[in-house]
Amino acid sequence: MTTLTFKEFLIEGLIEVPESLLKKLEREVISIIFSAVDAKLKQQGKSLKVSTEVAIDALSKIAKKYSVSISSAVNPYQKVVKRTVPNVTKADLPERYRDLLDKNIPPFLSADVNDDDKLTLQVHLFTGSKPKDWAASYSGTRNKLKINLSSLINAVEKIGKAIVDSAVVKRVIGEVERIIDSIRDILEHELTHYLQLRVFSRASPTYLNPTDFLHRHSSPEYYRSEIEFDPLIKTTIGNVTRGFKKLKTEWPEATIEPVLKYVVGEIQASVMIKQLKVTDDGVKADLLADYFFAKSEFFKHLRSEPGRWEKAVKLLSIGVKERLK
């Protein structure tokens, strides 16, 4: 029986993020989203002298759906909200990693976690008239995970007095739910980097290529780097799954295979539409305009490395089909 090196073992499949950590951070972010939007609505109502009670009540009902409370501690002018959570311990990790880590366990993964060494969650709220264009990032040196919600808060502020319109309120709530729906995938992407940098690279110093950290975001080198391989597959799994669920509500007979082939670059949009048997022009337009079904830059740039591309295609298909069960 061939013994895999730690690095070979990790690339056999996608890195598993501990569910306990993922759920904890997801809950924190969702609570901050509701609290920030609530604070902004109340501030607008006061400054514009209009009633935002309908919107606030609608927001409160949706918050109960997610079992989170709205905190008054977040104010409408706050730029950043910070939370800290303990780092993962060995016991938090999926069982399949534990034996491999036993021989070279990083100090902070011992039973006694250093209280000063925690993972910081930093959520950026409204930052000005031009929200920053990044969604999330993780810094290994600072052990800090950042998420940018400024576009949402900025959009709520721009609504102004129109917030008294029930149709506008519905759109606001829809946007809040759309972002919440993507939070888990955003967190899983960044927490994969957290495990790469805080756990696996310490246990196996050769696990990551140092040059991976020098690539400009969205450059060809970025998409082909080892450090982004797992996270970008996970991001694509989330995007395709959410988009396909939406498509199924408009076109119930749709099947996933043509969508997967289009996303990875195997077929053109016209072929995908033909294979999906979509005849409704409105559905066609939505399908082509939908962000979730955009041709993946990750798969496009990975095409120059057939072995890794084929592996990524396989992992994408498995991941999407698992999520659609």
Image: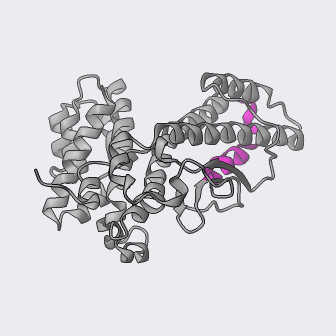
Which quadrant of the rendered structure holds the C terminus? top left
Residue 153 is covered by the magenta coloring: yes
Where 126 sits versus 202, above or below? above
Residue 290 visible in rendering: no
Range covered by the magenta-colored residues: 148-166
Residue 227 vs residue 169: left or right? left
Between residue 195 and residue 76, name the one nearer to us.
195
In the drawing, does residue 287 fall left or right of residue 78? Answer: left
**Magenta span includes 205:** no
Looking at this rendering, what residue extends furthest in the front direction?
Answer: 103
Residue drawn at (60%, 49%) of the image:
112
Q: Which residue is the extreme one toward the left?
A: 1
Instruction: Look at the magenta stretch and give its main secondary structure.
Output: helix
Q: Is residue 30 above or below residue 215?
A: above
Residue 212: horizontal and vertical position, in percent?
A: 37, 72
**Image quadrant of residue 74?**
top right
41 on left or right of 185: right
The answer to whether one can see residue 126 in this image is yes
Q: Position of residue 33 (x, y in %)?
A: 66, 41
130 or 208: nearer the eye?
208
Residue 150 percent coordinates (x, y): 65, 53
- Horizontal side of 192 relative to 307 (left or right) equals right
